[in-house]
Structure formats: structure tokens, C-alpha cells
């Protein structure tokens, strides 16, 4: 199975899963508290332009939950410096936090934002969580599969689903990728813009068929990899390589089938869809 290639031989104990779920809920409670309230907003960079008090407080709460339970683990987040214990090595467990994925949606009062938490070890994903704290929907992905609110899900649960293409924003796509994206739109039934990390949860349910994203950071990607793989989906770089940490930027294809992944790669190479 495809996720065996990615997950490898590493195992995750139940306490890690319990703390990850608790941390997601703790961070989500803070986001709900500030949702649709007046917040001071700072501009950061081109691809992650906005940050607020909500992001930072949520990340602190998530970090504290993890560090209190696992003081010897590495903790990486979006808003603060990495916490790296002095005796850590290549096999030390890494936590990756995006306390508020979809900041623009959040600040616009739209309920599509999520909390992302991932656990990796030696370049292998152990766990991913996508949590929407308003609806309390929680996706948990491991090598044993992906669940939504505790119920197992698979991308092929909806075999007659029309081709639904998605990306957070076409503004984030390079001209070459945008051209390929437009070509795929010719055979898609619907195109969904917006959604950020929430898109990958929908793909894991089989409700979105193909996601194309460019310019992502590690905290955007780390959690969605095990979510998609655990549900039997595909996720890889534009060139077909498996997703690995320590890159500056990620361009990824996520899909419900090898056929769709291969089709987009073919279009990227200049082959027109028929």
C-alpha cells in the first residue's frame, strides 16, 4: 500500500496521539475565543502575510501541552523558534505546528480555518491532525488509517464523485503551474478556491479529487501528508517525489488516485488534456 512507502517502520505510541488531540483542542479553543473579534494584525511575508494575537496564543498553548508531556521531543512551529533539546538526534521525534492554517479566512470571519499538528520521526510521518474548532471536526491520520471524528474514512468511499479540482488561491501558483491548472480545469466538474489545510481533509473523505498547491511551508504540509496517505490517497511533489522535511518551499499534488496525479504531471510537462 502506498502509505507503507512513506510511513516506514516507525511506530507511534498512544500517548503521542492523545497529546496531539488534546493540543489541537486547546489551540482551537483559543481560536474560537477570538473568532470574529477585533484583532490587531501584522503583515509578515508574501505567502503567509498575516498574523494576529490569536495565532500566537494558540501556538503557545499547543507548544506547552506538547512540551509538558514530551520535554525531550523537538517542537517546531510557525510563529516561534524551534525547541530542540540538547541531546536530540536524527531519530528524535519532531512535532510540527501550524496553530492557524487559513489566517486570511479566519480574519475574514470565514469558518474554513484549521489547526494543523504533525508528528514525524527520521523523515517519516507518524501522525497528522487537521482540526476545525468551530465544527469540532477532527481528522487524524496514521499508518493505521485516517479517521474523521473517530470514523475511518477512505478516498474511494465516493467512487462516483465528479472531478473536483482545488487550490487555496491561483495567486500562489507560478505562471507555468497556473497554465497547467487551467488546462486541468477543462475536464474538471468544479473548481474550489480557498480552504487551505481544510481541503486535504475533504480530499481524504473523497469529496475533493485533486489539490494543487505551490509555495507552501513545512508547517503547512507536515500534517496533511499522513492524513492523505492514511486515507489511501496520493501526495507528492510536482516531480513525483515523496514529501520530506527541511525544504524551504513545497509544490505538491494531492489526489484520490494515481491516475489524477499522473494526469497533472503530464499536463505540467506540456501535454494537453483530451
Image: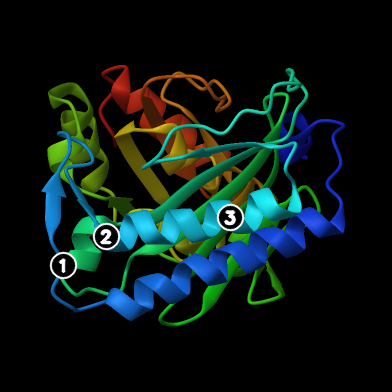
Q: In which quarter of the image is the C terminus?
A: top left
> Can you identify the residue that label 3 sits on?
64
- The tag earlier along the polypeptide, 3 or 2, is 2
- Residue sitting at 66 percent across and 58 percent down? 20
Q: How crowded is mark 3: few (under 14 residues within 10 Å), some or many (20 or more)?
A: some
Q: Is residue 12 visible?
A: yes
Kindly identify which residue carries mark 2.
Answer: 53
Above or below: residue 240 compared with residue 217: above
Work out how far the residue at label 3 is from the one at label 1, CA to CA, in angstroms: 23 Å
- Residue that mark 1 sits on: 39
Mark 2 surroundings within 10 Å by alpha-carbon count, few (fewer than 14), some (14 through 19), many (20 or more): some
Q: In this view, does 197 lie to the left or right of 131?
A: left
Residue 189 place in picture, x, y as percent: 28, 60
- Residue 231, visible in the rendered structure: no
Q: Between residues 222 and 204, which one lies in front from this camera angle?
A: 222
Q: Which of marks 2 and 1 is nearer the N terminus?
A: 1
- Circle 2 SS class: helix
CA separation in Å, label 2 and label 1 = 7 Å
- Quarter holding the N terminus is top right
Using the rendered view, name the quadrant where residue 194 is placed. Answer: bottom left
Viewer-side residue, 117 vs 228: 117
Q: Residue at x 27, y 41 (%)?
A: 184
The kind of secondary structure element at disc 3 is helix
Percent x, y for residue 38? 13, 74
Answer whether labels 2 and 1 touch (C-beta < 8 Å): yes
The residue depicted at 34 percent of the width and 65 percent of the height is 113
Q: Position of residue 179 (x, y in %)?
A: 16, 30
Q: Judge from the rendering whether residue 103 lies leftward or rightward of residue 178; answer left or right.
A: right
7 over 161 or under it: above or below: above
First of labels 3, 1 by sequence position: 1
Q: Quadrant of residue 208?
A: bottom left
Label placed on residue 158: none
Amino acid at each position: 500500500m502506498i502509505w507503507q512507502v512513506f510511513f516506514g517502520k516507525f511506530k507511534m505510541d498512544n500517548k503521542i496521539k492523545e497529546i496531539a488531540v488534546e493540543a489541537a483542542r486547546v489551540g482551537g479553543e483559543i481560536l474560537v475565543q477570538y473568532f470574529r473579534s477585533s484583532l490587531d494584525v501584522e503583515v509578515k511575508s508574501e505567502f503567509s502575510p498575516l498574523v494576529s494575537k490569536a495565532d500566537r496564543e494558540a501556538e503557545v498553548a499547543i507548544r506547552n501541552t506538547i512540551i509538558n508531556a514530551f520535554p525531550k521531543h523537538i517542537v517546531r512551529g510557525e510563529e516561534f523558534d524551534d525547541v530542540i533539546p540538547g541531546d536530540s538526534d536524527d531519530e528524535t521525534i519532531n512535532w510540527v505546528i501550524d496553530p492557524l492554517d487559513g489566517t486570511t479566512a479566519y480574519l475574514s470571519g470565514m469558518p474554513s480555518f484549521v489547526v494543523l499538528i504533525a508528528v514525524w520521526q527520521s523523515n517519516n510521518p507518524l501522525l497528522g491532525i487537521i482540526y476545525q474548532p468551530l465544527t469540532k471536526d477532527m481528522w487524524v491520520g496514521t499508518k493505521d488509517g485516517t479517521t474523521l471524528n473517530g470514523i475511518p474514512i477512505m478516498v474511494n468511499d465516493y467512487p462516483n464523485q465528479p472531478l473536483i479540482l482545488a487550490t487555496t488561491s491561483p495567486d500562489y501558483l507560478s505562471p507555468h503551474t497556473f497554465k497547467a491548472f487551467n488546462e486541468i480545469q477543462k475536464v474538471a466538474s468544479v473548481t474550489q478556491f480557498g480552504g487551505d489545510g481544510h481541503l486535504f481533509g475533504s480530499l481524504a473523505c473523497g469529496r475533493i479529487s485533486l489539490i494543487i498547491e505551490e509555495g507552501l511551508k513545512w508547517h503547512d504540509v507536515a500534517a496533511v501528508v499522513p492524513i492523505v496517505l492514511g486515507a489511501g490517497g496520493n501526495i507528492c511533489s510536482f516531480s513525483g517525489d515523496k514529501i520530506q522535511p527541511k525544504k524551504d518551499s513545497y509544490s505538491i499534488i494531492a489526489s484520490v488516485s494515481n491516475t489524477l496525479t499522473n494526469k497533472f504531471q503530464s499536463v505540467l510537462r506540456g501535454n494537453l488534456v483530451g
